[in-house]
Image: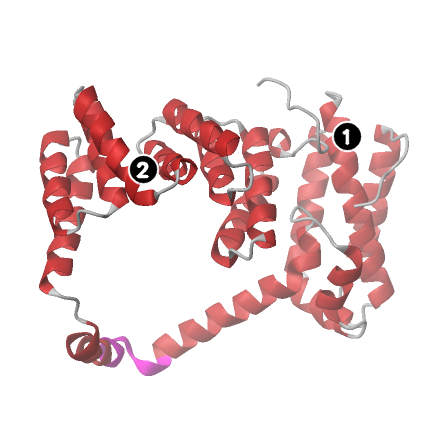
């Protein structure tokens, strides 16, 4: 994203208008030059919004216009992808432009490809017939994929424990997790959950022992803290989730998963700006480390938060969000 100089609300609104006019050209026969000009304007608008928003300027009207503009671009995604194919496609353009995750318009080809794949899977499902497909899968499962008895028993205990936990029956959930742990004593996630349940039952000594066992199994304190942070978040204990994630980041600033946990903790507390910053860090580090699944998940979460109302729009890099 290029730097912009002094920027006023009036200039911001003029650029929104220019982008709206260009978006009206996104129809059959559209020119690649118009699409690229629109993309560059969207880049500037993203940075301009962040800058003006950080100054406390009321941008509610502009936000509505931007959301409408983004909707038009998203709706025209297949046409835009076809138009830019004449310029070598978005892959080549991204290599030159190196857009950030927030500049999602530079990644429309991936969205279009994912939507085509989804439609194909839906067609395949209806064409094959659910009954036939289930029958084939059942045969394959019994012949080739059926897990050993101990594995199936462990899964049964875990499913039961999760259901009991949802009902608030901590004693029964603890018993089920302990039975699962007997079948898989090296599973760190089971030890984590047992530790959390001991905490809920106000048995701190046993909780500490279980957490120590989980950390030993993970072999990495930062990883163990990141995983526990996620579990706390799922239980709505966002203060504990945040504390674990912050400690994990302090221990290993390159651990992408730690930033995912931190973003989840912030999101659960409606601290959207901080959640965006954390998910952005997660996506960037996951991409650098070729953790593709985590990169996709974090990018999706980030894109969702970026499309929320004004308070969800991130500030410029390095700027500390104001308290909510």
Of the numbered discs in the image, which one, if any, rests on residue 250? none
In the depicted view, which residue is nearer to us: 237 or 220? 220
191 w.r.t. 74: above or below: above
Q: What is the chief secondary structure element of the magenta stretch?
A: helix
Q: Report the side of 91 relative to 122 (left or right).
A: right
Q: Is residue 58 visible?
A: no
In the depicted view, which residue is nearer to us: 195 or 222? 222
Of the numbered discs in the image, which one, if any, rests on residue 215? 2
User: Residue 213: where, in percent of width, then height?
Assistant: 24, 37
User: Residue 91: where, in percent of width, then height?
Assistant: 71, 66
Q: Residue placed at 65% from the left, 61% from the top?
A: 108
In the depicted view, which residue is nearer to us: 150 or 39? 150
Q: Residues within 10 Å of mark 2 (few under 14, many from 20)?
A: many
16 w.r.t. 317: above or below: below
Disc 2 from disc 1: Cα separation: 42 Å
Of the numbered discs in the image, which one, if any, rests on residue 51? 1
Quadrant of the snapshot with the C terminus: top right
Q: Nearer the viewer, mark 2 or mark 1?
A: 2
Q: Report the side of 92 relative to 33 (left or right).
A: left
**Colour scheme employed for the rendering of this structure:** secondary structure
Residue span colored magenta: 127-134
Q: Residue placed at 51% from the left, 29% from the top?
A: 250
In the depicted view, which residue is nearer to us: 55 or 254? 254
Mark 2: secondary structure: helix
* Tally of numbered discs: 2
Q: Residues within 10 Å of mark 1 (few under 14, many from 20)?
A: many
Q: Quadrant of residue 75?
A: bottom right
Mark 1: secondary structure: helix
Does the magenta run of residues contain 132?
A: yes
Q: Residue placed at 75% from the left, 67% from the top?
A: 92
């Amino acid at each position: 994203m290029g730097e912009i100089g002094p920027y006023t609300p009036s200039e911001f609104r003029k650029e929104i208008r220019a982008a709206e006019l260009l978006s009206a050209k996104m129809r059959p026969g559209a020119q690649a030059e118009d699409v690229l000009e629109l993309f560059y304007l969207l880049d500037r608008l993203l940075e301009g919004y962040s800058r003006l928003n950080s100054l406390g300027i009321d941008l509610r009207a502009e936000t509505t216009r931007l959301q409408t503009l983004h909707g038009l671009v998203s709706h025209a995604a297949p046409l835009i992808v076809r138009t830019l194919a004449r310029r070598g496609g978005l892959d080549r353009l991204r290599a030159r432009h190196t857009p950030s995750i927030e500049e999602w318009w530079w990644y429309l080809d991936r969205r279009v490809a994912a939507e085509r794949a989804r439609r194909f899977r839906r067609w395949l499902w209806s064409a094959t017939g659910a009954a036939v497909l289930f029958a084939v899968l059942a045969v394959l499962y019994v012949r080739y994929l059926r897990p050993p008895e101990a594995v199936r028993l462990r899964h049964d205990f875990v499913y039961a424990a999760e259901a009991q936990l949802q009902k608030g029956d901590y004693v029964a959930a603890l018993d089920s997790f302990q039975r699962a742990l007997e079948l898989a004593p090296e599973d760190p996630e089971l030890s984590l959950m047992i530790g959390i349940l001991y905490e809920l039952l106000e048995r701190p000594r046993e909780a500490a022992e279980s957490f120590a066992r989980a950390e030993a199994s993970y072999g990495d304190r930062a990883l163990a803290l990141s995983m526990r942070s996620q579990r706390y978040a799922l239980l709505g204990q966002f203060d504990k989730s945040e504390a674990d994630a912050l400690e994990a980041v302090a221990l290993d600033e390159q651990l992408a998963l730690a930033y995912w946990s931190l973003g989840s903790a912030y999101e659960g507390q409606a601290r959207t700006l901080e959640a965006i910053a954390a998910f952005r860090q997660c996506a960037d580090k996951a991409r650098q480390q070729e953790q593709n699944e985590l990169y996709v998940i974090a990018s999706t979460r980030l894109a969702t938060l970026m499309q929320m109302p004004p308070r969800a729009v991130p500030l410029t890099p390095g700027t500390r969000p104001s308290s909510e």
